[in-house]
Image (spheres, grey):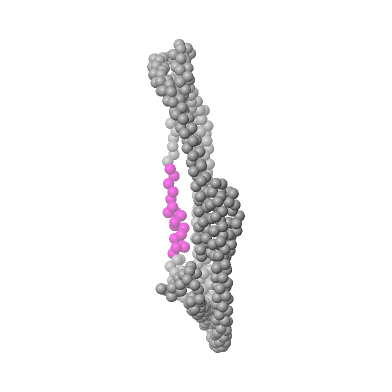
Amino acid sequence: MGVAETEVLDAVKAEPAAGLALYDPIEAGLAELREAGAEAFDVKSTAGNKAAREFVQRCVATRTATDEAYSNWNRPILDLQKQVREKRDAILAAVKAIETPVKNQIDAEQKRKDEERAAKAKAEAARINAHQACLNAISMLPRDYLSAPSAEIAAAIRDMESPEYLGQRDWEEYADQAKEAAATALTTLRAHLDNAKAREELAAMKAQQEAEAAARRAEEAKVEGERKRVAGIKDRIHAIEIAASTCIGLGVKQIQQRIDSLAREAADDFAEFQADAGAAIEAALGNLNTMLAAARDAEELAQLRADKARREQEAADAAARAEREEKEAAERAQRAEREAAAQREAEARAAEQKRLRDEAEARRREQQAAEAAGQRVRAQAETLLGLLVESRAHVPAGDLADRIDAAINAAKGE
C-alpha cells in the first residue's frame, strides 16, 4: 500500500523590527533624562527636594511606558503562538494514532521471532550444560577420595568399572568424552588407592611408635616431677634463709608483714627437709626481729625531724603570707586611686575616648595580675628551695636523700 507524501509548511519568520520601533519615541527622551539628572539636586531645600521628586516620577513614568509598550506589542503574538501550538499538537496526536497499530504489529512479530530464537538457544545450552556437568562430575570425582580410606576408594573403583555407571545416561555426541573421562578417573583412583594403603600402613607404624614414646615420656615426667618437688622445697628454704637480706631498707610495716608470713610457715610442710626448714625459719625470724627494732628507731627519729621541719616551714609560710598580703593591700590602694582618677578623666571625654580608655585599663589590669601571680610563684618557689636545701642536711644517706638532691639540682638547673 503506497503512502502519500505530506506537505510541510515553511517556518514563519519573525519580524522584531516592528516591535523595536515602538521604543523609538521613548528612547529619544533618554537624552533629556540624562541631562536633567546630570546636575545634583539640592534635596535639603524645599524647592530642590520637590524638583528631585518630580525627576524620579518622570523616570518611573518612562519605565512604566516602556513596559506597557512591550505588553501591548507582545500580547497578540502570544495568542498566535498558543493557537499554532494547539494545532501542532492536534496533528501530532492524529499521526500517532494512525502510526501506532502498524508499529505494534511490527514490534509483536519481532518479539515473537526473538523469543523463539532465545528458547531454542536456551534449550541447546541446557542440553550441552547438562552433558558438561556430568563430564565434569566424573573428572572431579577423584578429588573427593584424595584423603579417603582405602576401603572407600576400592568401592568407588568397583562402581566406575561396572557397565551401569556410564549406561544410565544417553551421552549423545559426548559418549567418547564420557569414556575417556571415566578411564582417566579410574587411573587416578587406582593411584589414590595405592597411596591410601601406604598411608594407612605408615599410620599404624607411627601409632605403635607413639605409644612407645608416650610410655617413655610418662616415666620421664615422673622423674622430672620428683626433681621439681625437691627443687621447690629447697627454693622455699633458700627464700626463708635470705628473708632478712630482702628486707634491708624497708620500713616497719613491711618487715612486720614478712615476720608474720614466716611465723605461719610450718616445718612439717617441707617433707624430708623439715629439719633444714625449721632451722632456717628460726634464724630468719631472729634476724628480722632485730631489723624490726632498728627500723622502728629510725622511723621515730625521721618523724621527729619531719615535725621540726614542718614547724619551721609553717613559720616561713606565715611570714611570706603576711608580706604578700601587705603588698597586695598596697597595690589595691594604688589601683583604687588610679581608677578614681581615670573615672574623673573619662567623664570629661567623648563616648569613643571612654571606650578606648576602658579597653586599655582592662589590658593593664590583666598584665598586673599576671605579673603579681608570677612574683608570688617565684617567691614561693625560692622559699621552698631554700627550705629543701636546709632540710637536706638532716636526712640520712639513702633513696630519700638522693631524690632530694635530684630535686634541688633540677630547681637550680644543674
The range drawn in magenta is 11-28
Image location of residue 278, percent across then percent down: 56, 53
Question: What residue sits 44% from the left and 26% below the top?
Answer: 205
Tell me the quadrant of the picture where the C terminus can be found.
bottom left
Please name whichever residue, 367 or 392, is drawn nearer the observer in this view of the structure.
392
Please name whichever residue, 307 or 57, is drawn nearer the observer in this view of the structure.
307
Image location of residue 259, percent across then percent down: 58, 59
Residue 359 seen in this snapshot: no
Image location of residue 114, percent across then percent down: 46, 24
Question: What residue sits 53% from the left and 76% below the top?
Answer: 49
Placement of 150 over or under 30, stated as above or below: above
Question: What residue sits 46% from the left and 72% below the top?
Answer: 405
Q: Does the magenta portion include 27?
A: yes
Placement of 229 over or under 219, stated as above or below: below
Placement of 405 over or under 206, stated as above or below: below
Please name whichever residue, 159 or 396, is drawn nearer the observer in this view of the structure.
396
Residue 300 seen in this snapshot: yes
Image location of residue 288, percent across then percent down: 55, 62
Image side of residue 31 versus residue 295, left or right: left
The overriding secondary structure of the stretch rendered in magenta is helix
The mark tally for this picture is 0
Placement of 44 over or under 193, stated as above or below: below
Question: What residue sits 58% from the left and 62% below the top?
Answer: 256
Tell me the quadrant of the picture where the N terminus can be found.
top left
Please name whichever residue, 164 or 199, is drawn nearer the observer in this view of the structure.
199
Q: Does the magenta portion include 110?
A: no
Image side of residue 165 versus residue 308, left or right: left
